[in-house]
Image (tube, rainbow, N blue to C red):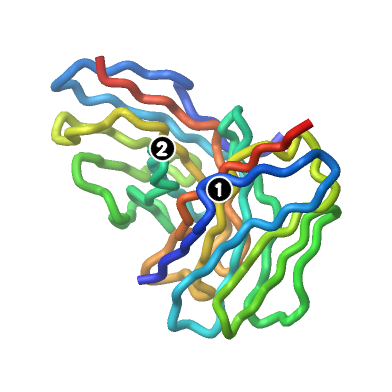
Amino acid sequence: DGGITQSPKYLFRKEGQNVTLSCEQNLNHDAMYWYRQDPGQGLRLIYYSQIVNDFQKGDIAEGYSVSREKKESFPLTVTSAQKNPTAFYLCASSILGLGLGYTFGSGTRLTVV
Amino acid sequence: AQTVTQSQPEMSVQEAETVTLSCTYDTSESDYYLFWYKQPPSRQMILVIRQEAYKQQNATENRFSVNFQKAAKSFSLKISDSQLGDAAMYFCAYREMYSGGGADGLTFGKGTHLIIQP
């Protein structure tokens, strides 16, 4: 079945560490997105990519980095520069140009310990 | 920048009753898309309904329907015959029509927590 796979489901990070969240899709979608979800804040866009080897900053990109070396994969690295990384992270993908909604992964819960 | 406002942080409804969730948005565009997403306790985001702004007819999906008022920039979701499985966070979202080559991404409201009373 086609879909988006995020891993791991839960991730714990020590202060000062970088961690990478995985996002893989087999839907042949062009665009992929990373959102952060905090209680009472809704979903906020971190980064998005519309094509391989290209990506754009969203509203809250500071402290995060991404890569898009393959169409199917869009990993997110939470760097030590992100001062408040504890949150729920959602990856999504979509077809461009058709105004369709996104397909979301099941999310990763990141906690700083 | 577009903004999406959901003024009801929490709503409660009796099972089998009807409930309406409110959403307003701000945009200078004339063509765009609007969505309602459901996020149950599993936290999986599920698309409930989609509306194209250039269509005057309100979208419906089984027990879910919208009241789209373009001039008022309002996009409310009506859930009829509420069921226990409808309990979730509901997010309203906006997307520009022309997403290539520039800013892209869904803009979400902060959500409404819907409680279903048995």
Compared to residue A54, the image places residue A25 above or below, namely above
Chain letter of the residue beneath label 2 in the structure image: A
Q: Is residue A23 left or right of residue B43?
A: left
Q: Where is the C terminus of chain A found, in terms of image quarters?
A: top left
Q: Position of residue B64 (x, y in %)?
A: 78, 55
Q: CA distance from mark 1 to mark 2?
A: 12 Å
- Find residue A89 and name its label: none
| Front-most of residues A96 and A43 | A43
User: Residue beneath label 2, please?
Assistant: A39
User: Residue beneath label 1, please?
Assistant: B112
Q: Residue at x 56, y 45 (%)?
A: B10
Q: Residue at x 34, y 50 (%)?
A: A47
What secondary structure is found at the residue carrying circle 2? loop
Q: Where is the N terminus of chain A found, in terms of image quarters?
A: top right
Q: Residue at x 46, y 38 (%)?
A: A90
Q: Residue at x 50, y 75 (%)?
A: B98
What secondary structure is found at the residue carrying circle 1? strand
Q: Is residue B34 left or right of residue B57?
A: left
Marks 1 and 2: same chain? no
Question: Residue A51 occupies which quadrant of the picture?
Answer: bottom left
| Front-most of residues A69 and B76 | B76
Compared to residue B8, the image places residue A70 above or below, namely above
For disc 1, the neighbor class at 10 Å (few under 14, some 14 to 19, many from 20) is many
Chain letter of the residue beneath label 1 in the structure image: B
Q: Is residue B52 left or right of residue A56?
A: right
Q: Position of residue B104 (x, y in %)?
A: 42, 64
Q: Is residue A9 left or right of residue B80?
A: left
Residue contact at pointers 1 and 2, CB within 8 angstroms:
no
* Amino acid type shown at disc 1: Thr
Compared to residue B101, the image places residue A23 above or below, namely above
